[in-house]
Image (cartoon, rainbow, N blue to C red):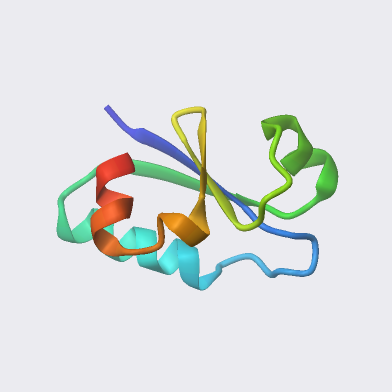
Amino acid sequence: MSTDIKILHASCCAKNSQIKKQIEEITSKNNMNVSIEEFSKIEDTMKFGTMVFPSIVVNGKVYDYRTHNSEEKLLSIL
């Protein structure tokens, strides 16, 4: 089963971010099957109910990336 990951950025931030690269490296190293999408348009990010950016949505649950940015913490939510 694939883990659905969405990365929510503020409108000023570009796609193909360091966050995406970090998650791809972690999931590859741990043989995890994931689907990653990035959003930065306000109409796309608002539907997740957060005003904290960047955020990560894992299978529908929103996490503040600033408190989950280490490999250990990311693995715990993936």
| Closer to us: 68 or 57 | 68
Q: Is residue 78 visible?
A: no
Position of the N terminus by quadrant: top left
Q: Residue at x 35, y 60 (%)?
A: 24
Percent x, y for residue 73?
Answer: 30, 53
Q: Residue at x 47, y 62 (%)?
A: 20
Percent x, y for residue 59?
Answer: 44, 29
Q: Residue at x 68, y 69 (%)?
A: 14
Does residue 38 sit above or below 77 in this rendering? below
Q: Going by the image, does 2 lie left or right of 48?
A: left
Does residue 50 sit above or below 64 in this rendering? above
Percent x, y for residue 36?
Answer: 47, 47
Q: Is residue 1 visible?
A: yes
Q: Going by the image, does 36 lie left or right of 26?
A: right
Q: Residue at x 41, y 68 (%)?
A: 21
Q: Quadrant of residue 26?
A: bottom left
The mark total stands at: 0
